[in-house]
Image (cartoon, rainbow, N blue to C red):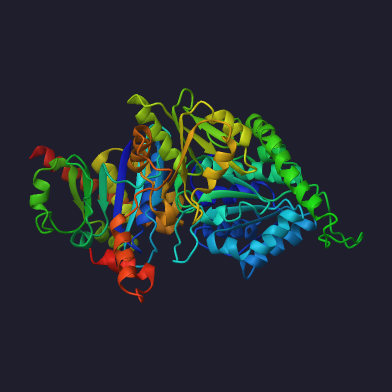
Amino acid sequence: MLRQIEGSRAVAETVAACRPAVICAYPISPQTHIVEALDELVRLGKIEDCEFVNVESEFSAMSVAIGASATGARAYTATASQGLLFMVEPLYNASGLGLPIVMTVANRAIGAPINIWNDHSDAMSQRDSGWIQLYAQDNQSASDLHILAFRIAEAVSLPVMVCMDGFVLTHAMERIELPEQSQVDEFLPPFVPRQLLDPNDPMSIGAMVGPEAFTEVRYLGHMKQLQALELIPVIAKEFESVFARRAAGEHDSDGLVTTYRIEGAEIVLVALGSVIGTIKDVVDEMREAGSLVGVLGITSFRPFPLDVVRAALKSARKVVVVERAFASGIGGIVSSNVRTALSEIPVKIMTAVAGLGGRPITGDSIRGVVERAIDGTLPELTFVDLDDELISRELERTRQHRRSGPMAENLLRDLGSR
Amino acid sequence: MFQVRIHGRGGQGVVTAAELLSVAVFHDGLYAQAFPSFGSERMGAPVVAYCRISEHPIRSREPVMEPDALIIQDSTLLNSVDVFAGASAAAYILINTSRSFADLGLAEFLADRQSDRNLIVPASEIALRHVGRPMPNAALLGGFAAATGLVTLKSVLEAISERFPERIATANIAAAQEAHDFVLNARREVEHA
């Protein structure tokens, strides 16, 4: 049904339509609206045979999801930021045990300094956790990807994170085609677990495995990710036939990536999440002005679609990866994956770090990055809209005084005195 | 694309106003995108919310920096926040106040602007009378419909009735209707002047 609805609410109603049996969560901004809505839906009896477990921390949220999933229940949770970090230990257990839990990550920065706003540092910190990671570019795809996530998770027995930009998407109200229950039921059959904890047929899950088989268990986990790489386009096609729309964006999309005007593009921007919308507007404007620009959106970051990315970028002369997170001491995270995909292709790859801690990524900023890429002045690593004066004042302070004090507070004081 | 920026203070329903406007526009068959500027919300602090309106799907996620219309829910913000930032001379300005533009110290600023697009409505007063609280958001949306013609009053009232429990909805609908008529009259007076 077509609705004008908040992103969080849309995700909650979509998850409800996926008939989870256990939902457990601990509230944290900007995920709160999702789990509040689900709590209400369970309380009102709108989700049949579903238990909402209010836990005392994210560690428990993931632990409950693991327990529920191991007993054959379709399990869902959601978190963000420090909450995701607090559940890291059981997070690895969920993937290591092969439990098909689905979790929304309402992407938010990680402290310190404390920051409640959007970037991708939280999900990116867990890119090697063994979870599948899907990134939504708008709220329609946020809703659709959750349905896809349960199918993929249960098909390969791996947990799936659906990442959506906190506030930018979770708190945005827009037009969304919400799935009909009958469509979801047709697309998503009841969960048949590969392993089942059952008191009538006792067994153990999560045994200690020594050097004799640990590598093999890990290798099989990797194989499952590669299996998902094959399966996602197939399942996305099926989604298209049941729901009469594409699961991860209106444009050319196979569930792994979306492409927009990359035909003949000399410069291709690569991005994840909601910034893709802003980039598409810039691409249209610049194309009209004669610049050959396009954008590749990565939906599936784990597994990373090396071949698909290579095919999409092979004709580009320059690639700019726009990233909402970065690895201190080296640079772009997505960029290094893109570099792996393009290792045999002579193309210049640059990283533009943008939108950290909730700083808006404007069309003007994106245009500036592309223009500099065109005229060859964009460095290999750039921080978009960096306040150079603020930085040089702090650097000067640290040069002059040993006790220069806390960095964040210094910067805020400088800003206040402008 | 038509871009609306709403300024107010925490507790005045600024975000709700943007959301209601987007729902009304949706009922009119257009695309709309409503979102707040993401501050740590607290009572009384300046709050900004946005609503984009278009005949086509809306892709951009940047904040509204060049608004085609401004709704100012609290006129005390005029002294502390650059509420007019980025607004062209043709932008609609709708201010919730019982005072005149001259009393607000805006006569000079507004002199060069399109006069039929500078509008005031005593939305808090109207709300106080109908709703029992000086919650100006719904009334201002009625005023916005009259000021711009971009959204129908019918759809604004429909959005209000979907959002609130019946008693509160009915009161807010009356407030929106009255503010709508107030702005419509003000526009007619400007046109006849």
Looking at the image, residue B94 lies above or below residue A413: above
Using residue A352 as the reference point, say whether residue A162 is left or right of it: right
**In the image, residue A84 lies at what x, y percent?**
59, 60
- Closer to us: B48 or A222: A222
Residue B95 visible: yes
**In the image, residue A414 lies at what x, y percent?**
28, 66
In the rendered image, the quadrant that contains the N terminus of chain A is top right
The picture quadrant where one finds residue B123 is bottom left
Residue A136 visible: no
The picture quadrant where one finds residue B113 is top left
Which residue sits furthest bottom? A403
**In the image, residue A410 lies at what x, y percent?**
33, 69
Numbered label tally: 0
- Closer to us: B131 or A16: A16
**In the image, residue A330 lies at what x, y percent?**
50, 52
- Closer to us: A368 or A379: A379
Identify the residue at horizontal 42%, vertical 58% (top origin).
Answer: B167
Using residue A270 as the reference point, say whether residue A68 is left or right of it: right
Looking at the image, residue B128 lies above or below residue B18: below
Using residue A305 as the reference point, say whether residue B136 is left or right of it: left
- Closer to us: A396 or A224: A396
In the rendered image, the quadrant that contains the C terminus of chain A is bottom left
Identify the residue at horizontal 59%, vertical 63% (top origin).
Answer: A85
Looking at the image, residue B11 lies above or below residue A225: below
Identify the residue at horizontal 41%, vertical 55% (top origin).
Answer: A358
